Image (tube, grey):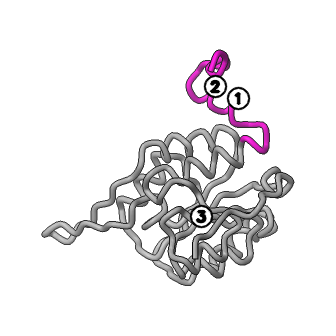
Amino acid sequence: MPWTNKPIDSDVLKGIKLLVLDVDGVLTKGEIAIISDGTEMRLFNSQDGVGLMVAYQAGLQTAIITGRATEAVRKRAEEVKITHIVMGTFAKLKPLLELCNKLGLSPKEVAYVGDDVPDIPPMKQVGFAVAVANAVEEVKKTAHYITERAGGEGAVRETIELILQAQGKWEKAVGEFIGDLDWHKGL
């Protein structure tokens, strides 16, 4: 059965203070390359990366909760200013709640982007649950919003833009990031 997005409550988006992301299937297309020496390789989307740096500029906190622990994920998180990283757990609800407690946030102030069944428990607790376009059906049924873009193809950027536009922060944060506050005039 095709799934359509539910109406988005802009007040929910305005209250989002933390964006939590899965990695494989969200920040990547879900493909994992294992090189002959055992090293893992991931391919990350550059538009998602810019979106994450704009989110940082706007003051939106970001986090990763992922089942696999790799140096590639740690390096990418550092590059794109993701400040909270939890790796090596497929049971994601407990780390999400611990992170909320640490930051003094309610789960309702959190947006969570996922693609597969380990993401369902945290998605059920947050204020804004997002499934990437190519997520499994069970995740789509749990989501408040399904991105137009697939995981690893700009879905994270799409989510960030949606949140920051609702908060009235997108244009200013992009302008500060690129050093041109008038970047959007004439578009």
For residue 118: magenta?
Answer: no
Marks 3 & 2, CB-CB < 8 Å contact: no
Which is nearer the N-term, disc 1 or disc 3?
A: 3
The reply, left or right, for residue 51 in relation to residue 167 is left
Instruction: Pinpoint residue 76: horizontal percent, then vertical percent.
Output: 42, 52
Instruction: Pinpoint residue 92: horizontal percent, then vertical percent.
Output: 59, 78
How many numbered circles are shown?
A: 3
Query: For the magenta stretch, what is the residue range?
Result: 165-187
Amino acid type indicated by mark 3: Val
In this rendering, the answer to whether 185 lies above or below 18 is above
Instruction: Pinpoint residue 155: horizontal percent, then vertical percent.
Output: 53, 54
In the figure, residue 53 lies in which quadrant? top right
Marks 1 & 2, CB-CB < 8 Å contact: yes
Amino acid type indicated by mark 2: Gly
Amino acid type indicated by mark 1: Lys
Q: Residue at x 60, y 39 (%)?
A: 54
Q: Which residue is mark 1?
A: 172
The local crowd at label 3, few if under 14, some if 14 to 19, many if 20 or more residues have their Cα within 10 Å, is: many
Q: Which residue is mark 2?
A: 175
Q: Residue at x 62, y 31 (%)?
A: 174
Per the model, the C-alpha gap separating discs 1 and 3 is 24 Å
Q: Secondary structure at mark 2?
A: helix
Residue in the foreground of this view, choosing between 83 and 153: 153
